[in-house]
Image (tube, rainbow, N blue to C red):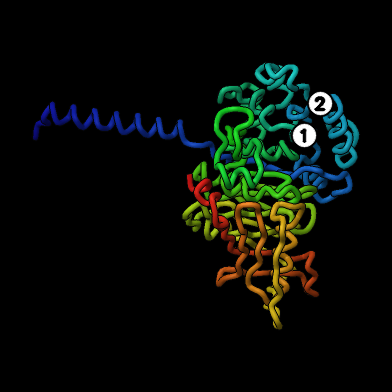
Amino acid sequence: MRSVDSRRFAGILCGAVLFLAGALLLSACAPRRATNGHLVVIGGSLRESNTEIYNRIAELTGEGTIGVLPTASGVPDESGPAAAERLESYTGEGRATVIDITTENPEAANTRETAEEIASHDGIFFTGGDQARVTAAFRPDGRDTRGYRALEELLGRDGVIAGTSAGAAMMSDPMIMGGTSTAALLHGRAGEGEDAPGVLIGPGMGFFPYGITDQHSLARGRLGRLIVALDETATDFGFAVDDNRAFHADLNTGVLEALGGPQGFLFVDVTRTTRSAGGSYGVRLSLLGSGDRLLAENGEVIPAVEKIRLTPPEGEPGELAAEDAWGRHVIRDLIVELAFDPATEAVAQDENFELHFVEDDWTRYWVAPGGDPETLTVVDLRLDIIPKPGETVAQAAD
């Protein structure tokens, strides 16, 4: 019988132990990947009349109840009851209750009573306000509270977490906390200090595992800051939701569905983007509306079943341009105009940059029969962000 060299055996054993320790460490440090449950991510300014969004929340919670968390709000005594009342108009009386965790008592997020109260519901609704208030209560200094773990367990049993405005921003980790598109493009990630320019990024709740979420996106011209946030955090995909629009993320399947109306869900893919001299080239954009779906893992868009490919228009190309890139719905309107014009490029102006929206071999448009622009779905439009000549180019490259 062959004997085993004790030193060689010890080396093999030591290597195996180190390998297992390393694997456990990597596992502990890896981002969480939720595999059960549902998220309804709402861009803010949600109207009570938006039946598609409210009905989806009601449908997902079934016969269960919804807990409303006004944690993000500066006026929780108003926003919490108002949200509960709206939800009850769709779910039924007595089905929505406010859970009292605010800036006045953030420590309540770490009590057994709070965890049990969250666990008693089948759905949770986060109001708008300031997303940093949510993480300060539920994940102070990166520590998971009892209330946070109860929220994770709710998803684990196929529950639903919905959030509007700040309640949408906090879904991802990392999380955008503030900043404008212009400041983000010029300065990148904001440094320390309350008034530091740039896009402010911090840890989020991490319920949404596919990329960074942002809200009020097209109404408030926030595309630029999302692109910078993706770059600064080495994140591939951004998911931007507009006012009075939403998407439903089925974490069991990785399928996202746009809700609430046309052209309100913007998917941003920077996996093919190159950066040079302060500019970003080859950002890919897809714009979805109600009924359109997206496979979150790879960004494949599945247009609503009734939609057909838009035939490229013929004729003399127009001169498609906008002076204020970050004005209300300027980017959305310019993209729709480009789809229905023979032109293959549209340009929007920022004070220091030009945004070139370009149709190329990857770009596709889909519409409902009849060609109504309101039904337009945009797939894989190219965006180049080009610094204007002058001192701002050097600033952007720093």
Quadrant for residue 17, please give it.
top left
Q: Residues within 10 Å of mark 1 (few under 14, many from 20)?
A: many
Above or below residue 158? Residue 372 is below
Q: Residues within 10 Å of mark 2 (few under 14, many from 20)?
A: many
- Which secondary structure, mark 2? helix
N-term-proximal mark, 2 vs 1: 2
Q: Residue at the spot x=70%, y=65% of the render? A: 321
Residue extending farthest front = 390
Q: Are marks 2 and 1 in contact (CB under 8 Å)?
A: yes
The amino acid at mark 1 is Thr
Q: Nearer the viewer, residue 262 or 295?
A: 262
**Mark 2 = which residue?**
76
Q: Position of residue 351 (x, y in %)?
A: 65, 52
Quadrant for residue 116, please give it.
top right
Q: Position of residue 268 (x, y in %)?
A: 60, 54
Question: In this rendering, does residue 235 appear at all?
Answer: no
Q: Residue at the spot x=79%, y=45% of the render? A: 59
Above or below residue 36? Residue 296 is below
Q: Residue at the spot x=78%, y=27% of the render? A: 74
Above or below residue 216? Residue 119 is above
Q: Position of residue 23 (x, y in %)?
A: 37, 34
Residue extending farthest bottom = 315
The amino acid at mark 2 is Pro
Q: Tell whether 214 sits left or right of 73.
A: left
- Which secondary structure, mark 1? loop
Quadrant for residue 118, please give it.
top right
Q: Position of residue 373 (x, y in %)?
A: 78, 68
Q: Tell whether 396 sits left or right of 75.
A: left
**Mark 1 = which residue?**
127
Q: Residue at the spot x=68%, y=22% of the render? A: 115
Question: In this rendering, does residue 309 appear at all?
Answer: yes
Instruction: Name the quadrant of the N terminus.
Output: top left
